[in-house]
Amino acid sequence: MIREVCSILNGCVILSGDEGGQPVAIPLGSAAASPEATAEREGDRRPARECWGGVASRRLALGPCVTPCAARRAGVLLLGARVCRVARSGSHPPRPLLPRPGGMAEPGPGPSGGGGEEQEPPGPGGREEAAPAPKKRRLAAGERYVPPPRKLSAGVSFGAEHFAETSYYFEGGLRKVRPYYFDFRTYCKGRWVGRSLLHVFSTEFRAQPLAYYRAAARAGRLRLNEEPVRDLDIVLKNNDFLRNTVHRHEPPVTAQPVQILVENDEVVVVDKPSSLPVHPCGRFRHNTVIFILGKEHDLKELHTIHRLDRMTSGVLMFAKTAEVSKRIDEQVRERQLEKEYVCRVVGEFPEHEVVCEEPILVVSYKVGVCRVDPKGKVCKTVFQRLSYNGKTSVVKCLPRTGRTHQIRVHLQYLGHPIVNDPIYNMEAWGPDRGKGGKVDKTDEELLKALVEEHRSKQSLDILGISEEDLNASAENQDCGNAGGCTKSGPVNESSCPAEDAKDPERNGAAACPLDSGSNQERLENNKELGSWENRDGQTGGKSSEEKDPLCVECKMTRRDPSPEELVMYLHALRYKGAEFEYCSKMPEWAAEEWEE
């Protein structure tokens, strides 16, 4: 018996009845509307194409009111001489689609059709999805294969393998990190496609001379799709995965411990020392709160709720689960949290309450400098003096918004900068040090003056930058003036958007400055480099006390900052929400009788 599709009406396929019988209405997309199900319902075991259409015409037997497109929308599709399902959601068990030569699929034997093969259960909602095996394109002669990109885990999560990369030691009141091998990893950026690796290094990763990259390639430290790079002239393709193994040095931080104030099933609350970043960013990785908590307190997979500037100390909260983090984050967005800071400022602060609502503009994310500007973001801070010792004042600060450096910039604008602020209480701002927003310099001149002032004091690390960064920036500026080059773009080791905004991770190269021609020649001719191998083969090798032959920083001598230089007189005293309130002790410098 051959039925024909008479019409498609009100969401149903109308099939012709048998001789003198009534037409049959089948809901669209249902399993019962498939040719196999129709054949089985009629007790017919002939191939589906014989039940639904003429064999000679190799088409469905469509009625005069039905087009092939309408039939396809009804849930059937003719492929060659066989009828295959398109969308089905009924209770009848589907027949598996068997691959045909050339990648075409055809119905396999049904429940009563023999074969004895186990059927796969239908997908979600009873829907059967035929997932053809991905085709591997044949490569042309000499063409390089690029593997598909790997799925990277979302968010930042550090485990034992990361904490074991290196270790701490303490010296002169400072916490120091032993240099260690680390892998910077990135996928090929869109703007790199079609460019040689050498060209990318020469235009975007300029912290080292090209001689360094050639030596690193010979040493096996540069890998493309996990294969050693032997020729820097190789042309990059989309989805290329680059890995650069470097010998990494981190700046020292204060040796003050990270004190845990509260720990329960939901949160961890700590008293963060000054000079410590919250999480990995820039040159800091192990000298961060996240890594210290993991390495010394076995607290892992914490969720950052809020952050403090690196030079700010005080109450810092982490959530233990994503649910808690989301709940508190909603309170942050709805301005339901109260934050209270204390600081010590220059001069006699007014006794009455002072409210500052000057907008703040970011001058440089790299150095982390802001200033008051009408084009900036709206913000508000409330100040109240707590004490005055004849030279300096202790002030309570209540920020109503959360802009970068908001308290520090507003205090500078009021003419009472924080006593030891390494940015906003510097001579680079002019004789009035930025009071009233008066700065007789362009932004570029201001940044240059700030850097030069710290360079003269050998205190660039306090800004979170190094000579290597400055050399790279100068090179890129010259390159930009000459034309035909692009400025360097940072490659982050991890997803740290909050900290990256003001101190972005540097490129995927070691922290080695541009050096003289003699050093380039030494790198080119160093015979030891060719035998170097990544000693662990993992992200971040074991720490090494030995000098690395490729690392210029190993050959440099730096002045360590004093512990006093790493403390700024700004402290987060209290953090209060709808269901919690956490406080720390007043810092020593906030005592009324304290004198510097």
Image (cartoon, rainbow, N blue to C red):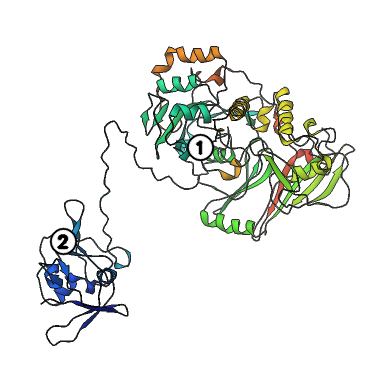
Residue with the mark numbered 1: 493
Q: At 63% from the left edge and 36% from the top edge, which residue is drawn?
A: 366
Query: What element does badge 1 sit on?
Result: loop
Kind of residue at disc 2: Gly
- Residue 30, visible in the rendered structure: yes
State the image coordinates of residue 153 (x, y, percent, origin top left). Answer: 44, 46
Depth check: 102 or 295 in front? Answer: 102
Query: Does residue 15 sit above or below 168 in this rendering?
Result: below
As drawn, the label of residue 304 is none
Depth check: 382 or 71 in front? Answer: 71
- Residue 180, visible in the rendered structure: no
The C terminus lies in quadrant: top right
Residue with the mark numbered 2: 108
Gap in Å between the C-alphas at discs 1 and 2?
A: 50 Å
State the image coordinates of residue 212 (x, y, percent, origin top left). Answer: 49, 21
Crowding at dot 2, Cα within 10 Å, few <14 / some 14-19 / many 20+, comes out as some
Kind of residue at disc 1: Glu
Q: At 27% from the left edge and 42% from the top edge, which residue is drawn?
A: 137
Q: Earlier in the sequence, mark 1 or mark 2?
A: 2
Depth check: 202 or 129 in front? Answer: 202
Query: What element does badge 2 sit on?
Result: loop
Left or right: residue 222 compared with residue 41: right
